[in-house]
Image (cartoon, helix red, strand yellow):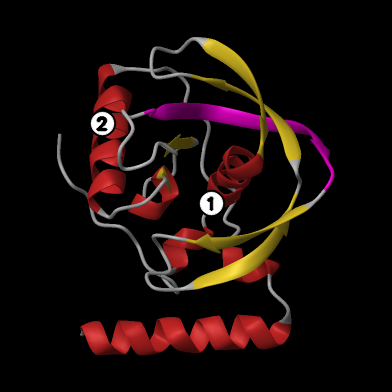
Amino acid sequence: MALREILHYPDPRLREVADPVDEVTDEIRTLIEDMAETMYDAPGVGLAATQLGIKKRIFVIDLAGDDEPSDLRVFINPELSDAAGTQTWDEGCLSFPGGNAEIKRAATIRVRALDANGQAFELEADGLMAVAIQHENDHLNGILMIDKLNPLKKRLLGRKMSKAQAASV
């Protein structure tokens, strides 16, 4: 396993749309392990392959609390459906370090995907799990949380990220 570099906004690679995974190989499983290690190290609750500059339709999520055992979930080639209701959540993103924003999303969703072994599964999600799945799936489609904001909030978050990037150079 290895830590990988997380791309930060406004890196243009974050806008690239991911390609489907044709087959779950050992190389894909190694990528998933690296993604999980990178997410935990960051620390975060989700990470999409596109945030690492890898155009594969894969994301990982772990919503377990600090005092709970890991609950890593792997989503390969996810397909979302049956979105219903709305909820607003204060979201952060590993590609927007230190930035967060209130984002409106579906309250419940259904997702169909493959797991790390290539086995198909279906999950109905609500609450934070629904938010995390939608957030990470957006990354696979080149959509960022800043795209969900009104123009004023978009400018404020963009400025905050530009200042953070300038300070880290």
Magenta segment, principal secondary structure?
A: strand
Q: Position of residue 164 (x, y in %)?
A: 34, 84
Residue name at image x 71 percent, y 84 percent:
151
Residue 126: image quadrant is: top right
Residue name at image x 55 percent, y 28 percent:
77
Q: According to the image, label 2 marks what residue?
A: 33
- Which sits in the foreground, 9 or 156? 156
Q: According to the image, label 1 marks what residue?
A: 139
Q: Residue 76 vs residue 135: left or right? A: left
Residue name at image x 59 percent, y 44 percent:
128
Magenta region: which residues? 71-85
Residue 119 appears anywhere in the view: yes
Q: Is residue 122 magenta?
A: no
Q: Position of residue 118 (x, y in %)?
A: 45, 13
Q: Which three-letter amino acid code belongs to the residue tagged 1?
A: His
Is residue 87 depicted above or below 18 in this figure? Answer: below
**Where, quadrant-wise, is the C terminus in this rendering?**
bottom left
Residue 144 appears anywhere in the view: no
**Where, quadrant-wise, is the N terminus in this rendering?**
top left
Q: Which three-letter amino acid code belongs to the residue tagged 2?
A: Glu
Q: Residue 124 vs residue 96: left or right? A: right
Residue projecting furthest to the front: 67
- Give the CA separation, mark 1 to mark 2: 19 Å
